[in-house]
Amino acid sequence: EVQLVESGGGLVQPGRSLKLSCVASGFTFSNYGMNWIRQAPGKGLEWVAYISSGSSYIYYAETVKGRFTISRDNAKNTLYLQMTSLRSEDTALYYCARRQLVDYWGQGVMVTVSS
Amino acid sequence: DVVLTQTPPTSSATIGQSVSISCRSSQSLLHSNGNTYLHWLLQRPGQSPQLLIYLVSRLESGVPNRFSGSGSGTDFTLKISGVEAEDLGVYYCVQGTHAPPWTFGGGTKLELK
């Protein structure tokens, strides 16, 4: 069974940093590209970042470019999102999702940016 | 960036009724490789989104066949033939033809009448 489990969220002050993790199981993690997608409270879905299976291709939404860094450790079956210079508008539930098809999603981890 | 416009924003249905949701793209989603990367997701209340239909009309494994997708170019439709209680939630279309960025429609909330 495919499972994606996010962690690392919480309450953080504006301008501070936070690192999210997503541990994958039930499939060969190193064979798949991965995404971070977020959902602000009561809002729709917003794609944040994508990383290819071997980390050769990395893309970011304009809203996070230069502040967020996506990475992965295939030996640990883990996807990461390093978030810096956080803003109130980054407050959202952050999901990791498998490949460009977004065929599997984690349960999400909440990030709240507030003073 | 590609803008996906979903209509209606909210749909009210009775159990057993058929429902259609539209997703219109600001540009053609036909990729140069011949595929159309338009997919449909369902987010049930309090849950993560799940993939229902991919590449316009292909049913994801385990998804009931009362769900169907159709369309081409810029106009796409998700149809539910006989709504069941478990179908309630928010439906999203998402495109990958002109990614990055991957873009989502604004969502259509399906509720009981």
Image (cartoon, rainbow, N blue to C red):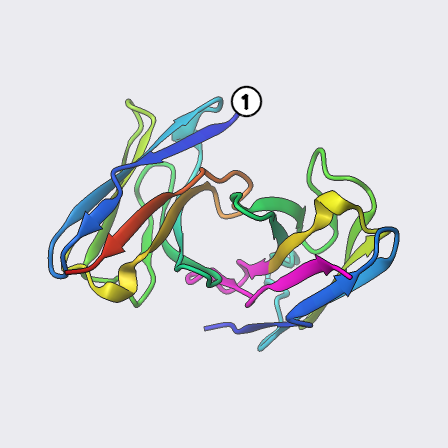
**What residue does disc 1 label?**
A1
**Residue B75 belongs to magenta span:** no
Picture quarter containing residue A41?
A: bottom left
Q: Is residue A13 above or below residue B46?
A: below
The chain to which mark 1 is attached is A
Q: Residues within 10 Å of mark 1 (few under 14, many from 20)?
A: few
At a point 51% along the width and 27% down the height, the residue shown is A2
Q: Is residue A27 above or below residue B69?
A: above
Quarter of the N terminus of chain B within the rendering: bottom left
Measured as percent of width and height from the top left, residue B60 is found at: 68, 40
Q: Do we see residue A92 in this rendering?
A: yes
Picture quarter containing residue A29?
A: top left
At a point 87% along the width and 57% down the height, the residue shown is B17
Q: Do we see residue B71 in this rendering?
A: no
Quarter of the C terminus of chain B within the rendering: bottom right
Q: Is residue B112 left or right of residue B47?
A: right
At a point 65% along the width and 56% down the height, the residue shown is B35
